[in-house]
Amino acid sequence: MEDLVRYSKITEKCEREIVLLKAKPCFWGKCAFCDYILDNSSDEKSIDELNDEILKNVTGEFGVLEVIDSASVFELTEHTKKSIKKVVEEKNIKHLFFEAHYIYKDRLDEIREYFNVPITFKIGIETFDNDFRNNVLKKGAYFEDYREVEKYFDSPCIMVGIKGQSKEMIDRDMEIIQNHFERATVNIFEENNTSIKRDDELVKWFVNKYYYLKEDPRIEVLFEITDFGVG
């Protein structure tokens, strides 16, 4: 996956720079919809060389940097974390965005203490429907209530437009992210090489009903998977 775009700027909501780094293999690696794990590698030397090149693009112009990868922040190499910290210090980054799997909920302070700047932690929930999340999407994020997520994470990522989802399920997810979280991201599912299929009629319904979210400064809707400019 070397042809991926790995640096961009987000200028519509919460202006920031964003980098897509390469990581070690995802500890979970079983999500039924995910083909980004193909970007994982066990070759730490090549990972570090690539990530150092990507991080050279960061200017610090917004003072905010989002770092994503094909796993969690915890799957970044030690060298890469040191490189990010160096960028934070040299480019005067005052706020970071990272993503972590729910399994890491009790370790987030390790990252906060390491970088010593405010961090917004994203989490790929996909849906708050427990059965669909774990038995269909195979997410491996086990909790019963949104409050369990809210306790640890700042910004859930929701996925819509998947065959098997219902309008009621999506309505509930939208109600939760609008009323109980400071920030959220909504991804409209794009078919890839996995067995999970897109429901175009559901996507049309969602876009029609929830298009107003484009004006909500707290919620970023990715109508295309590359709407953040990377990927």
Image (spheres, rainbow, N blue to C red):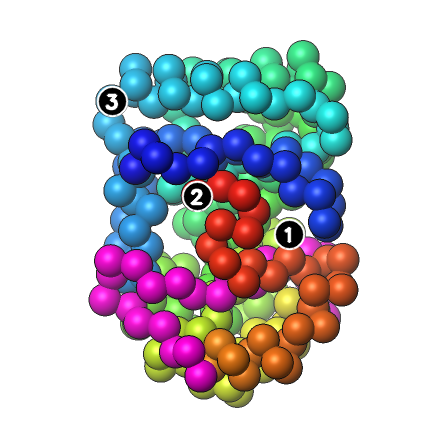
The residue closer to the viewer here, 92 or 27, is 92
Mark 1 residue element: loop
Would you name the residue on which mark 2 appears? 231
Q: Is residue 68 magenta?
A: no
Q: Quadrant of residue 117?
A: top right
Residue displayed at 33% across by 46% down: 36
At label 3, counting other C-alpha atoms closer than 10 Å, the crowd grade (few under 14, some 14-19, many 20 or more) is few
Query: Which of the image's four quarters has the N terminus?
Result: top left
At label 1, counting other C-alpha atoms closer than 10 Å, the crowd grade (few under 14, some 14-19, many 20 or more) is some
Residue displayed at 40% across by 63% down: 190
Horizontal arrangement in the rendering, residue 68 relative to residue 134 (left or right): right
**Amino acid type of the residue tagged 2 in the rendering:** Gly
The residues bearing labels 3 and 1 have C-alpha atoms spaced at a distance of 32 Å
Q: Quadrant of residue 70?
A: top left
Foreground mark, 3 or 1? 3
**Amino acid type of the residue tagged 3 in the rendering:** Asp
Query: Which of the image's four quarters has the C terminus?
Result: top left
**Amino acid type of the residue tagged 1 in the rendering:** Asp
Residue 217 image offset from top left, x and y in percent: 76, 57
Magenta segment, which residues?
Answer: 178-201
Horizontal arrangement in the rendering, residue 119 relative to residue 29 (left or right): right
The residues bearing labels 1 and 2 have C-alpha atoms spaced at a distance of 23 Å
The residue closer to the viewer here, 166 or 179, is 166
Would you name the residue on which mark 1 appears? 154
Q: Are marks 3 and 1 in contact (CB under 8 Å)?
A: no
The label on residue 43 is 3
Seen in the picture, residue 117 relative to 186 is either above or below; the reply is: above
Q: Residue furthest front?
A: 3
Mark 3 residue element: loop
